[in-house]
Amino acid sequence: MECGLRALQELILLVRAREKQKIGSLAMKTNYKDKKIISGRDEEAFNEFLAGKERWNAYVEKHGDDTEVDFSGVDFPKRRKYGDKCNFSGYRFPKKGHVNFEEANFGGAVVYFDNAKFGEGSVNFNKVNFKSFVRFKYTEFGKGVASFNEAIFCKDVNFNFAKFGEGGVCFLGTEFRESLFFMMVEFGEGDLSFTGAKFRGADVYFNGTKFGQGRVFFKEAEFENSDMMFEYCEFKGDVSFRSLKGSDKLNGLSFRNSIFNKSLDISDNSFNCIPNLSNTKLTNQVSLDRMKVNHPNTYKKGDGESLCRLKEIAEDNKSYQQALDFHVMEMRAKRCERESPFSRILDCFFDKLCVYGQSISRPTICLLVSIVVSWGFYGYYSNWNMENSFLYSLSQALPFVSAGRTSANYNFNKLFTCGAVQEWMYFFSLIQGLFSFLFLFLIGLGLRNRFRL
């Protein structure tokens, strides 16, 4: 009995050994250089991909430089343990071949491509639904286009310190539901496009990034409770934030300390935040056409500096009305920073009276009210001589008119012919003249600002 069992075990071991020998001989016969595609549907290729960077990199080295990697539509959860990370850090791909992960399913796993190195071909992650965190830190992309069109990032996505080659980078129609990090990234000569991208409460950080000669597009991108930070960046190509959707839902937009070697277009937007272009170097025109910054209910520290910079840009563009609007907001922001209560009260009075020289109607109404009030006052103390009272009040308001002084003396004598005039009447006349002069000055200031060429 025991002898029979031993014989059976030896037979099984012999069969397994022969199978391994057969598989090994077949592998030796495989010419990987002739294979033009590494497919995720190939059992061997898929297993090598999941085995770690050493196995995968050695597997890729067996193939030709122009071999394509096609993992499009691959369902990773079916072949892996639930909850495992998709850690592809340090992976190398063929030097010239394309890499395709379009519509691949990573399930709810965290996806890492840190320090991965793609070749000169295109890299395609279109229509992938990343349900967990995604990281491409220190990743190197080649000359081909890197596209994430219509992908969905449900959690944070991190491209910090990544490098892109000559190809463009596309996020057309991509949806971001949490933060997007592109800090200290180096872009190549291709365009970077977020046209039609959707930022659903996602903050965007491009701080310290260097952009190549390619253009940067955020045209018609949609925002919802998002911050966009482009501080300490260098843009060598044209930059467009024109016609953003939901620009009024942006919490912040900052280009502080950045360098623009070509044009910047922020036109056709309505912001509830104050775009920050402080300390920026602008070598070409900045387009602010039809850009509106709505007056905030409260100002925070630094808003005055940002508004001053916007005012300077508007003045350089000969857009004086826009510059005046920014000036009003700048003064209101700086008012909150004043330490002296008297200065704040005086500043507030100037704002309410003429909106810092922009309003013509407010001082005009005040002037007319002062004339009417003084008319009634003079009439009351002159036994209701209303005609002479009105002419005297009008002459006090318009003393610079040639007939003003003569009219004032004549009507004053008509009003007060019954004895000596009390001193306070002269005092009231002086006060009316002083306020009238102030209102006339503010009317002239408003006319000057309104019709400035």
Image: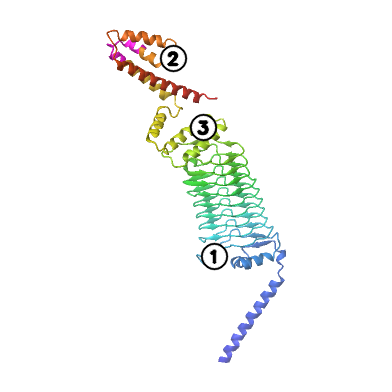
Relative depth, front residue between 58 and 307: 307
Q: State the mark number for residue 78.
A: 1
Residue 148 sits above or below residue 80 on the image: above
Relative depth, front residue between 324 and 163: 324
* Amino acid type at image mark 2: Phe
Are the residues at dot 3 and dot 1 in contact (C-beta closer than 8 Å)?
Answer: no
- Does the magenta-highlighted stretch encompass residue 383? yes
> Residue 207: x percent and y percent?
55, 49
**How many marks are shown on the rendered structure?**
3
**Residue at left offset 40%, top offset 33%:** 343
Direction from residue 435 to residue 318 in the image, left or right: right
Coloring scheme of the render? rainbow
Quadrant of the image containing the N terminus: bottom right
Say few, some or many: other residues with alpha carbon within 10 Å of mark 2 (under 14 / 14 to 19 / 20 or more). few
Which callout, 3 or 2, points at the residue further toward the start of the chain? Answer: 3
Say few, some or many: other residues with alpha carbon within 10 Å of mark 1 (under 14 / 14 to 19 / 20 or more). few
Quadrant of the image containing the C terminus: top right
Direction from residue 423 to residue 208 in the image, left or right: right
Numbered disc in front, either 2 or 1: 2
* Amino acid type at image mark 3: Ala
Which callout, 2 or 1, points at the residue further toward the start of the chain? Answer: 1
* Amino acid type at image mark 1: Lys
**Residue topped by disc 2:** 400
Residue 304 sits above or below residue 198 on the image: above
Q: Which of the 4 quarters of the picture holds residue 90?
A: bottom right
Please give the range of residues in magenta: 377-391
